Image: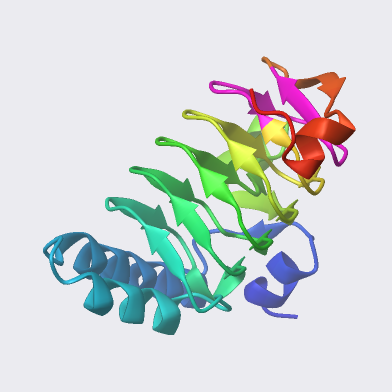
């Protein structure tokens, strides 16, 4: 089994494997190019994103700068918007549903390191997928950790650190992020606004 196959299977893998390193450098090069495209060339930026990411909707915007380890491990749905400084360390699949809105400085981090220092210092790590549902809104500075799923229609407050799954139809915030309250029927139907 290759190190890449181990990574995709959620097994301990060597992060400095030759093929993983090659994929990483290619991905960083694409992000560098993306971040250098002038603002008035939006269509060019969007076309590069669509060729780089594993799956996209028709309409998507990621405001530069954008940092990503492996674009082939990122899926975004229709009408995806991410403000400045989105970081996705995509050692495992990171999937966003339709109509997801991210504030600035959000980070998604599937990799985990072993607890024992000898294994960690040898360059070994794990990576577990992150899934974000449809109609999710995250404020600025949200951090989402390895293996987390966030349900549809959920709002994550600015500065939150999401360490565990968050269900659908709630407002959650904090460090660690916790459910504050369910969204009301009026909020979900658009009859009541914040």
Q: Quadrant of residue 73?
A: bottom right
Is 68 on the left or on the right of 37, as rendered?
Answer: right
Q: Main secondary structure of the magenta part?
A: loop
The percent position of residue 64, horizontal first and vertical second, equals 27, 53
> Does the magenta segment cover residue 167?
yes
In this view of the protein, can residue 148 be seen by the observer? no
The percent position of residue 142, horizontal first and vertical second, equals 55, 31
Is 152 on the left or on the right of 32, as rendered?
Answer: right
> Does the magenta segment cover residue 108?
no
Is 58 on the left or on the right of 36, as rendered?
Answer: right
- The quadrant the N terminus occupies is bottom right
The percent position of residue 157, horizontal first and vertical second, equals 62, 23
- The answer to whether 49 is drawn above or below residue 16 in the figure is below
Is 144 on the left or on the right of 186, as rendered?
Answer: left
The percent position of residue 81, horizontal first and vertical second, equals 47, 54
- The answer to whether 150 is drawn above or below residue 130 in the figure is above
Q: How is the image coloured?
A: rainbow
Q: Which residues are magenta?
A: 156-173
Tell me which residue sits at (59%, 69%) in the image: 78
Tell me which residue sits at (11%, 63%) in the image: 38
In this view of the protein, can residue 50 be seen by the observer? yes
- The quadrant the C terminus occupies is top right
Nearest the viewer among 37 and 127 is 37
């Amino acid at each position: 089994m290759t190190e890449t196959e181990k990574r995709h299977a959620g097994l301990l893998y060597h992060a400095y494997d030759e093929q993983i390193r090659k994929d990483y450098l290619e991905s960083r090069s694409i992000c560098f190019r993306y971040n250098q495209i002038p603002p008035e060339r939006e269509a060019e930026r969007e076309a590069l994103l669509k060729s780089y990411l594993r799956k996209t909707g028709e309409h998507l915007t990621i405001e530069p700068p954008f940092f990503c380890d492996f674009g082939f491990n990122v899926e975004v749905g229709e009408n995806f918007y991410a403000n400045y400084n989105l970081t996705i360390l995509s050692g495992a699949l990171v999937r966003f549903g339709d109509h997801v809105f991210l504030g600035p400085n959000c980070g998604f981090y599937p990799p985990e390191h072993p607890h024992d220092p000898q294994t960690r210092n040898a360059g070994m790590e794990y990576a577990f997928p992150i899934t974000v549902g449809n109609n999710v809104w995250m404020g600025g500075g949200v951090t989402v950790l390895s293996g987390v799923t966030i349900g549809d229609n959920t709002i994550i407050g600015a500065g939150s650190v999401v360490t565990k799954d968050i269900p659908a139809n709630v407002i959650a915030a904090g460090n660690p992020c916790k459910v504050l309250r369910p969204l009301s029927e009026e909020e979900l139907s658009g009859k009541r606004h914040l």
